[in-house]
Image: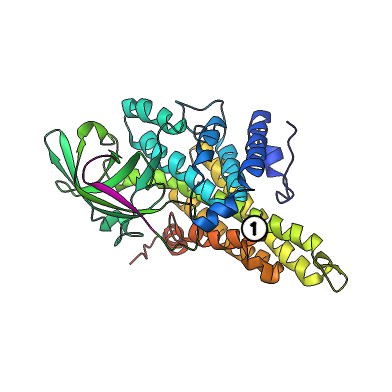
């Protein structure tokens, strides 16, 4: 399959940096998304339902397995995996989010903080979509302050742990088979992680209704009432919030890639509309102010893409730190928010209906802007590096 660079990849990063095998995989994912997902996703978005029929095809394409030694079909780079996230978000940010939870947060927790035995048991099941995973960190009263403010507790009783507490905004949680629950150990006050089967007595998940963003993502409130988990399901290398942060460092960069993909989806839809829509006897693309919207959007995409490419190169080299992914996430999501707004403005009134696609990107951008670290929190992470002063409180 011949590689076709996106016109929005204005400086040709993908063509220059991806191997032939990586380019082939990107093209297969793009073709599948445009053929199978793009025509149906608007209806699912409107109904706030997730298209579960796409999960197995995602696994068959390798999307859920590229990152892990136990399952990856070929050697690949973090830049390649970033372009996969970009391609998925270009089609739909909810699909990208599902993959980010299943692959980045659930499987990633086990890959980073699990034992060799846990990795061997659970990662292949998640990669093949034999099971669906979710990730339970955020709580009703604890979001940005999870490092200190976690209220969910874990108490050891013999060979079991007893979990109590609540979680909120947990993606995939209405239909997941396991959830990675992060809880504070009552004995030492440290945050620990647990692989919790959702069929465990005392575990309940309730869908969050009324969302205006990422509507297909099945976010849930989770309640844990004396949920008993064996020691064998405690993540053996998760001993403090530092281990949780190591997982978020990787997924935060992927959210930045997804933000670029969301901006590209809106930008491409705006370009297509502008070349077809006529006003004053000519396509609106021939008007100066419309061209300004499009050029501004392309500039944001190009600058953000340069940043996320470099962050992923640093991940491959083992030099990426928290502040690097934090700056990429804060910057790319802010530029995405501007870009989808210019795209919506290009469509005028048609920019607020689902028929033309832009409205979906416009709404979904709000969730990407906030989750996995708000702009403010990521700004303070970078600010601490710049100044040597922590200004979180």
Q: Position of residue 180 (x, y in %)?
A: 33, 42
Q: Position of residue 46 (x, y in %)?
A: 54, 58
* Residue farthest toward the left in the current orientation of the protein: 158
Give the left or right position of residue 292, taking residue 130 as reference: right
Magenta stretch: includes residue 292? no
Quarter of the figure with the N terminus: top right
Quarter of the figure with the C terminus: bottom left
Query: Up-down: is 327 above or below 108?
Result: below
Q: Position of residue 136 (x, y in %)?
A: 33, 48
Q: How many marks?
A: 1
- The residue positioned 77% from the left and 63% from the top of the image is 274
Q: How is the image coloured?
A: rainbow
Query: Up-down: is 337 above or below 155?
Result: below
Label 1 sits on residue: 357
Q: Is residue 103 visible?
A: yes
326 vs 158, nearest the viewer = 158
Magenta segment: 199-208
Give the left or right position of residue 80, taking residue 212 as reference: right
Give the left or right position of residue 256, taking residue 341 as reference: left
Residue 269: which quarter of the image?
bottom right
Which type of secondary structure does the marked residue at label 1 adopt? loop
- The residue positioned 29% from the left and 47% from the top of the image is 182
Q: Position of residue 48 (x, y in %)?
A: 48, 55
Residue count near mark 1 (Cα–Cα under 10 Å), binned few <14, some 14–19, many ≥20? many
* Residue farthest toward the right in the current orientation of the protein: 281
Q: Is residue 307 visible?
A: no
Query: Up-down: is 74 above or below 170?
Result: above
* Residue farthest toward the bottom in the current orientation of the protein: 280
Residue 267: which quarter of the image?
bottom right
339 vs 245, nearest the viewer = 339
Residue 387: which quarter of the image?
bottom left
């Amino acid at each position: 399959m011949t590689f076709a660079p996106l016109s929005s990849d204005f400086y040709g990063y993908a063509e220059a940096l991806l191997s032939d095998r990586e380019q082939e995989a990107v093209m297969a994912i793009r073709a599948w998304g445009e053929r199978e997902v793009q025509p149906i996703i608007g209806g699912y978005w409107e109904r706030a339902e997730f298209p579960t029929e796409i999960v197995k095809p995602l696994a068959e394409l390798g999307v859920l397995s590229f990152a892990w030694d136990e399952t990856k079909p070929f050697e690949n780079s973090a830049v390649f995996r970033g372009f996969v996230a970009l391609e998925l978000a270009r089609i739909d940010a909810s699909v990208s989010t599902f993959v980010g939870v299943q692959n980045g947060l659930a499987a990633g927790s086990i890959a980073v903080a699990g034992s060799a035995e846990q990795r061997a048991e659970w990662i292949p099941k998640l990669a093949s979509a034999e099971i669906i995973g979710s990730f339970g960190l955020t709580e009703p009263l604890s979001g940005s302050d999870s490092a200190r403010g976690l209220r969910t507790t874990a108490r050891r009783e013999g060979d079991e742990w007893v979990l109590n507490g609540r979680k909120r905004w947990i993606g995939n949680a209405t239909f997941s088979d396991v959830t990675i629950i992060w809880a504070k150990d009552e004995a030492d006050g440290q945050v620990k992680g647990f692989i919790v089967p959702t069929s465990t007595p005392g575990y309940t998940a309730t869908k969050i209704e009324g969302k205006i963003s990422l509507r297909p993502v099945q976010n849930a409130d989770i309640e844990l009432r004396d949920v008993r988990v064996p020691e064998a399901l405690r993540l053996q290398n998760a001993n403090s919030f530092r281990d949780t942060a190591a997982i978020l460092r990787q997924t935060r960069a992927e959210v930045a890639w997804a933000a670029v993909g969301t901006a590209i989806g809106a930008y491409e839809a705006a370009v297509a509309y502008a070349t077809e829509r006529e006003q004053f006897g000519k396509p609106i693309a021939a008007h100066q102010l419309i061209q300004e919207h499009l050029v501004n959007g392309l500039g944001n995409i190009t600058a953000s893409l340069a940043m996320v490419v470099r962050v992923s190169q640093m991940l491959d080299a083992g030099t990426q730190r928290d502040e690097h992914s934090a700056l990429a996430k804060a910057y790319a999501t802010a530029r995405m928010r501007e870009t989808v707004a210019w795209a919506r403005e290009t469509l005028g009134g048609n920019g607020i209906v689902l028929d033309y696609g832009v409205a979906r990107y416009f709404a979904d951008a709000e969730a990407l802007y906030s989750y996995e670290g708000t702009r403010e929190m990521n700004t303070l992470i970078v600010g601490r590096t710049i100044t040597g002063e922590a200004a979180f409180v």
